Amino acid sequence: MALEAETKRMVAQFEYTAEDVNKGVKEFMREMEEGLAKQGTTLSQIPTYVTSVPNGTEKGVYLAVDLGGTNFRVCSITLHGNHSFSLQQSKVPVPRSLMEAETAHELFSFLAKQIESFIKTHHNEHFEKHKNVPAAEDFFDLGFTFSFPVNQIGINKGRLMRWTKGYDIDEAVGKDVCELLQTEIDALGLHVRVAALVNDTVGTLMARSYTSPGKTKTLIGAIFGTGTNGAYVEKLDRVKKMKAIEEAEGGVTNYDESTGLMVINTEWGSFDNGLSVLPSTQYDIDLDRESVNPGLQMFEKRVSGMFLGEILRRALLSLHTHPDAGVALFKDASSLDNDIRSTTTVGEDSPLYQQWGIDTSFLSIVEEDQSDHLRITKQTLEKELKIEAASTEDCVAVKMLVHAIGKRAARLSAVALGGVILSTNKLEEDEIVDIGVDGSLVEYYPGFEDYIREAFREIEGIGENEKKIRIGLAKDGSGLGAALIALVAHNAE
Ligand code: ADP
């Protein structure tokens, strides 16, 4: 009983009430406005130079490449024009030596060669046709997903700010990565044009807008995976900082102003870094302090897959090491549980004791568990955390905490999505507001969308209109999405 009472006390700390949600939405909308007005704000609100979204009737063959870390992926996407598409792809690991090469040429010529061999294999007719005709016009348009920090100054122009994920090629920093790739493609004589530099969140928005049923265009693309971020369609005249950006960058490349729209990459992972409205338990505070970037990505640290497991681990550990032995979790040295006398042991090398020791997929398994005496949770604790013979009471406590942490993450997600929906006024303007989502958390965490919807209904200004909001999975932002961005970039010329 003592454990249950203490767990309830902890669970209450994760409660994120309707009032909190509404405060969060207000602050989110304020930061959105601020981010549209000037640079250097908490919500970065980055213009992507993508000025339209597809409706599913588009046709053609486009290329997409994705340099995200370990692998380089090349694919071609054939759009059938009826919301469907087919895809061919190849994936190769990037050799370690190239990640730390002396020159950008070494890495980017490798990438161009992969594109060449992909075209030879899958689009030989295109390759043969152009081999000896350098002036031919029908180029493949290519969308380039480049998942490193870039300062984008045009639809196919962006300067590398710094490398991450183990890459380190000094010479490339400050250069336009599209141009680096284009130069190597041209050197091979390929008829490929790097048409767009792609952010994966924008890719998600585009992919959903193409595949979603009917003619409705999608408003938001959102990722809830390792990290979290969202992109949405904004009215160009609301992006007040456009002029300031052009001046700061010494002019940006042309973009199509005729649509009156601009897709904005919010970078909402850093929403409310000042912690004016975000909930903060001791576990959130400790997690942040011991992270590689204290004080940054505060929203993401409460929402995304990379962090939920760690929040749970810290909560479980504090219950496990509770000074009152009568309260402590995983401590019933010898208990009669389910008519079997068992001894609970926590292995010395249990991931419970290791930072980042619990993966967020663990939360999904526990949240889903409806088995008798939480047998599945018990087995998972044993398999993944080296905790043997946990009692049912222990498992109930684990499940209560998992549920509290997962539900809070979903309700916070509703703050970001709800903020964008209200700020764009789309519920008033359109019959349906469509959202595309991607990422393992939203895909696999049981009930994640339901909790988001529940919070939507509590938001002033949404309420009953929650029914007008459609949420759908949009896979493959860096393939289909990137191809679609190449398409709109081409059409905008
Ligand atoms: P990424 O965002 O890196 O492209 P994913 O969308 O697969 O890739 O997200 C990976 C993150 O999702 C990891 O942080 C992982 O802990 C978490 N994750 C993986 N499987 C699940 C699951 N079944 N339920 C909840 N979270 C999961």
Image (spheres, grey):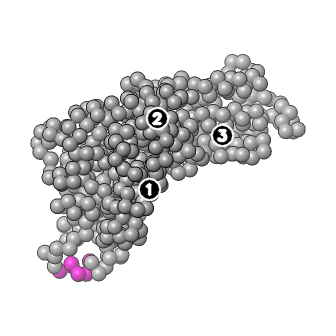
Q: Specify few, some or many for label 2: CA neighbours under 10 Å numbering under 14, 14-19, or 20 or more.
A: many
Label 2: state its secondary structure. Answer: loop
- The answer to whether residue 410 of the structure is visible from this angle is no
- Residue type at the position of mark 2: Ile
| Quadrant of the frame with the C terminus | bottom left
248 versus 325 height, above or below: below
Q: Specify few, some or many for label 1: CA neighbours under 10 Å numbering under 14, 14-19, or 20 or more.
A: many
What is the x, y in percent for residue 384? Answer: 65, 44
Q: Which residue is mark 3?
A: 385
Q: Residue at x 35, y 33 (%)?
A: 29
What is the x, y in percent for residue 178? Answer: 23, 55
- Residue type at the position of mark 3: Leu
Q: Which residue is mark 2?
A: 459
What is the x, y in percent for residue 409? Answer: 51, 37
Q: Residue at x 46, y 35 (%)?
A: 459
Q: CA distance from mark 3 to mark 1?
A: 33 Å
- Residue type at the position of mark 1: Ala
The tag earlier along the polypeptide, 3 or 1, is 3
400 versus 67 height, above or below: above
What is the x, y in percent for residue 278? Answer: 45, 28
The tag earlier along the polypeptide, 3 or 2, is 3
The tag earlier along the polypeptide, 1 or 2, is 2
**Which is in the foreground here, disc 1 or disc 2?**
2
Tell me which corner region of the image, top left, top right, bottom left or bottom right, holds residue 450: top right
Q: Is residue 360 left or right of residue 324?
A: left
**Which is in the foreground here, disc 3 or disc 2?**
2
Q: Which residue is mark 1?
A: 474
Q: CA distance from mark 3 to mark 2?
A: 38 Å
Look at the image and give the residue range highlighted in magenta.
127-132
Tell me which corner region of the image, top left, top right, bottom left or bottom right, holds residue 94: bottom left
Q: Is residue 170 left or right of residue 209?
A: left
Residue 119 in magenta stretch: no
